[in-house]
Image (cartoon, rainbow, N blue to C red):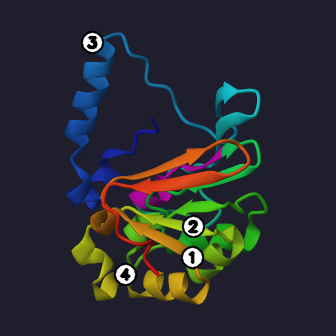
C-alpha cells in the first residue's frame, strides 16, 4: 500500500480521511500484517505462465506529469495468463492516462477494466487506442453508466466495438481464463452492452 499524505487525502474528502488510513495501518500492525509499498515491477506469481505485474505506480507527487490528485496514485497492473492479458487501471485519469497512452508500450490487453468507473475525468481516448482491448469491463452503477458523465466511454465502446460489461447493468462479472481463451459470465443474463 502506498500511503497518500494528509494533504493529498484532505483534497479528496469523498475517498475517506487520513485518520481512517492511519486506523487501517494501526489495525494491520496490531494483527502483525506488514504493509509493504507497491512498486513498478512487483509481481504476484500464480504459476509459471500466470502472474500479475505492476506496470506503473506513482506517489501523486513525483510522476512524469508532475503532481496529480489521489487518482494518479492508482496502480496500473497487468494480469498475464499465458496468451491472455487483462489490464487493471484503478482510477487512472486524464493527465497520467494521456502520458501512458502516448508513451507506454506494454499496456495492450484483451480486456480493460475501465479507468475511473468510465466517467469523465478518466484517461483520454489515446489511452484506449493504445490498450486496444476487445472487452471493456466498467465498474459503475447503472445510473452513472447511462449518465452524461459516461457518454465518452459509451461512444468509445460503440466506435471500437468493445464487448462491454457494466456491473450496474450485468451484476457480478466473472472472467475465466484458460490461458489461450477466456469466457465472461455475468450475474444477470443481459446481453453484453453494445
Of the residues under marks 3 and 1, which one precedes in the sequence? 3
**Answer yes or no: do the residues labelled 2 and 4 have beta carbons within 8 Å?**
no
**Answer yes or no: do the residues labelled 3 and 1 have beta carbons within 8 Å?**
no
Quick one: which residue is furthest to the front in this view? Answer: 189
Of the residues under marks 1 and 4, which one precedes in the sequence? 4
Could you tell me how far apart the alpha carbons at marks 1 and 4 are, in whole angstroms? Answer: 15 Å
Mark drawn on residue 124: none
Q: Which residue is mark 3?
A: 30
Residue lying at 45% horizontally and 35% vertically, measured from the top left: 1
Of the residues under marks 3 and 2, which one precedes in the sequence? 3
The span picked out in magenta is 70-79
Q: Which residue is mark 4?
A: 150
Q: Which residue is mark 1?
A: 162
- In the depicted view, which residue is nearer to us: 26 or 182? 182
Give the vertical position of 125 relative to 168 (above or below): below
Give the vertical position of 130 relative to 86 (above or below): below
**Answer yes or no: do the residues labelled 3 and 4 have beta carbons within 8 Å?**
no
Percent position (x, y) of residue 106? Answer: 76, 57
Percent position (x, y) of residue 35? Answer: 43, 24
- In the depicted view, which residue is nearer to us: 24 or 141? 141
**In the structure shown, which secondary structural element does the residue marked by tag 4 occupy?**
helix
Q: Which residue is mark 2?
A: 135
Residue lying at 70% horizontally and 39% vertically, measured from the top left: 41
Of the residues under marks 2 and 4, which one precedes in the sequence? 2
Could you tell me how far apart the alpha carbons at marks 3 and 4 are, in whole angstroms? Answer: 41 Å
**In the structure shown, which secondary structural element does the residue marked by tag 3 occupy?**
helix
**In the structure shown, which secondary structural element does the residue marked by tag 2 occupy?**
strand
Residue lying at 69% horizontally and 44% vertically, measured from the top left: 80
Amino acid at each position: 500500500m502506498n500511503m497518500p499524505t494528509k494533504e493529498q487525502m484532505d483534497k479528496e474528502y469523498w475517498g475517506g480521511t487520513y485518520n481512517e488510513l492511519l486506523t487501517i495501518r494501526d489495525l494491520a500492525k496490531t494483527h502483525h500484517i506488514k504493509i509493504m509499498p507497491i512498486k513498478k515491477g512487483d509481481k504476484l506469481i500464480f504459476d509459471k505462465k500466470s502472474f500479475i505485474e505492476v506496470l506503473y505506480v506513482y506517489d501523486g507527487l513525483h510522476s512524469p506529469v508532475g503532481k496529480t490528485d489521489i487518482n494518479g496514485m492508482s496502480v496500473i497492473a497487468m494480469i498475464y495468463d499465458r496468451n491472455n492479458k487483462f489490464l487493471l487501471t484503478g482510477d487512472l485519469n486524464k493527465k497520467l492516462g494521456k502520458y501512458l497512452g502516448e508513451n507506454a508500450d506494454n499496456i495492450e490487453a484483451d480486456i480493460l477494466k475501465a479507468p475511473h468507473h468510465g466517467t469523465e475525468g478518466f484517461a483520454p481516448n489515446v489511452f484506449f487506442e493504445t490498450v486496444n482491448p476487445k472487452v471493456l469491463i466498467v465498474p459503475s452503477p447503472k445510473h452513472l453508466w447511462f449518465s452524461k458523465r459516461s457518454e465518452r466511454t459509451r461512444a468509445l465502446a460503440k466506435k471500437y466495438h468493445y464487448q462491454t460489461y457494466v456491473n450496474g447493468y450485468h451484476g457480478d462479472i466473472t472472467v475465466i481464463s484458460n490461458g489461450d481463451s477466456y469466457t465472461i459470465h455475468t450475474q444477470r443474463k443481459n446481453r453484453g452492452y453494445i
